Image (tube, rainbow, N blue to C red):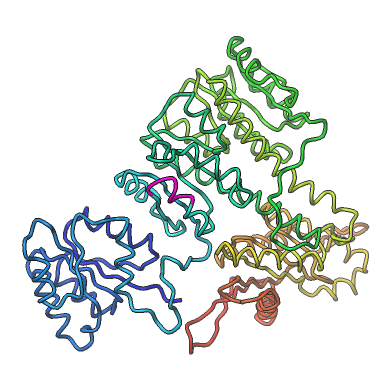
Amino acid sequence: MTTPTVLVIEDNAKNMKLVRLLLQMGDFRVREAVDAEKGLTLAKQERPDLILMDIQLPGMDGLQATGLIKADPHLGAIPVVALTSYAMEGDKACALEAGCDGYITKPIDTERFLDVIQTYIRPTSNDEASPRQARQHNTTRILIVDDDPKNVKLMCGMLNREDYELSTAADGFSALERVRETPLDLILLDVMMPGMDGYEVTRRLKADAETKSIPIILITALDSPDDRARGLEAGAEEFLTKPVNPVEIEARIQSMLKLKRYRDQLVIRASSEDQACSDVAVVEPPAPAGNSRHILIVEDDPKDLKLLQSHLISPDYSIEFVRNGSDAIETISRRQFDLILLDILLPGMDGFEICRRIKQMDDARDTQVVLITCLSDMENKIRGVELGADDYLIKPIEPRELQARVRVLLKKKAYLDSLHAHYAQALNSALLDGLTGLYNHAYLKRFLDLEIKRSQRQGHSTSLLMIDLDNFKQINDSLGHMAGDAILREVARRVKDSIREIDVAARYGGEEFAVVLPYGDSQALRKVGERIRGLIEDRPFLIPGREDDQQVTVSVGGAVYPTDAATVDALIDTADRMLYQAKRDGKNRVVIFEPQAPGQPTLAMNLQ
């Protein structure tokens, strides 16, 4: 699909910014000029699908520029829509007389703007769909719900990123309708709205099996602890008060998206193991053994410690406490916890350093860490998030907010535990390869098939790496099959160490391995493929019973669905062809498929 290009000729910076944001929300490609002369030059170079022309421009005005465009045989067919002001009587008539195909009045109606724009875009033979309906793969769909257009505009400006696809709704009823129409990854929801407030919208979405897994962040001017607790109890995953800090909301969005992806992968893996279809009921994490989640409180103030303990009295929680950082690290190294409530201001080692160390521990990195402090400044909040903290609370702590946040984080931990448990439970089943401990060929095909189906529904990409040991037959012949088996096991371990928890590594057959990267694009493929290749080449392999180390290298090929292939088998075939191209090009290298424009030969990106 070709992305339509809109040329905006506008000298007012604020108007330009607003039009740019709206067009980007509609997946248009935007080109900009601040005067008519530059606009005419860009029009000749770009041949846009539409020109938005301000009438009042410095130098040559918009009407004169429109006349030149319509007189040019190469540009005359391009629709020109005038941007006019109610304050300028007669501008509309003058614009049409000058050759404009339409006009949009200022101030711009943000809710109808994209619908109006679309009426002037001529569909191509290959694309009859609106760019608002077509989703760019690997974008995150975010719905912004607020009845105040200024707040919507502000939020769209904060989230102006290529990988975010933004849509808006002005009230709760419209939001529910939008959710039913379009798969979403996240909802930013105002609380105070006419008709139906954000609490009720949240309750309805969370009561529906088809929408309950969509993370909801409530954003409102209400800032009392009771309001926050009420929102979290309604089912929202997060509650932020206005005015919102851009860095904070970005951190919260990324945390919520991570939670959703854990949940989605739990569904896919359960479906793969059961050989069921992908349209299964929402998978909830299983109850922990003994129905108890382990919580550690790190707090040196006896009063604060007593309050925290009293707020978390529950048969579902097993609580321990320590008073300083060194005791915390020692306790965490001895046993696993689901959640750690961590004061920042501690004697000796502060909470930031403790958090950093926890997230570096293999056995504790999934533990949910909540920083607790009297510091309410944004710098410390963001510092905690950057160190890996999963949440933070400001003293004095409101009991209902604490309990609600703890429930959300324990659910996130349960999803992580379930992902690990699915792998552990399969150790002695037919799902795993007996030699390497990775998933086997049959499981890979089932998983990839379900992941592709989910990609089709949700509009994200899925990528595949194929990995083959170089000269493995010679290694087997010279060192023996036992040594070859030891190398295969070590390669499998290094591959698994190189990927994320949501990625799937499998032994495809013989000395060939495969890695599926949900949400992965060609850039991610290159990065992960090169990481695997380097990790295997840079560290010689120890062979049992031999003094000399063995140098091992791999060739890697990769491809992405749907840009490089339309089916599971085609994706595997394309990645495999890239693998063998890497072999032909000299081995010990990564080759990623690079689609080219129609009529041009297909190329591959060689990374060695």
Residue 306 is drawn in which quadrant?
top right
Q: Residue at (83%, 63%) from the top-left corner? A: 488
Q: Residue at x 9, y 56 (%)?
A: 87
Identity of the residue furthest to the front in this view: 195
Pick whichever, 596 or 228, lies toward us: 228
Q: Nearer the viewer, residue 80 or 510?
A: 80
- Residue 47's spot in the image, x, y percent? 28, 79
Task: Report x, y in % for residue 94.
Answer: 8, 71
- What is the quadrant of the C terminus in the image? bottom right
Q: How many marks?
A: 0
Is 172 colored magenta in this rendering?
yes
Residue nearest the viewer, comparing 321 with 261: 261
Compared to 516, does 160 lie above or below? above
The image quadrant that residue 190 belongs to is top left
- Principal SS element in the magenta part? helix
Q: Is residue 156 magenta?
A: no
Left or right for 100, reference 306: left
**Residue 601 image offset from top left, x and y in percent:** 53, 87
Q: Relative to residue 125, is residue 325 depicted above or below?
A: above
Can you give x and y, in whole percent of width and height, for residue 212 in the image? 60, 46
Note whether 604 is above or below 380 in the view shown: below
Q: Residue furthest top?
A: 303
The image quarter containing residue 444 is: bottom right
Report the residue at 47% width, 58% height from top. 163
Going 10% across and 63% down the picture, which residue do you hit? 56
What stretch of residues is rendered in magenta?
170-176
Q: Nearer the viewer, residue 436 or 439?
A: 439
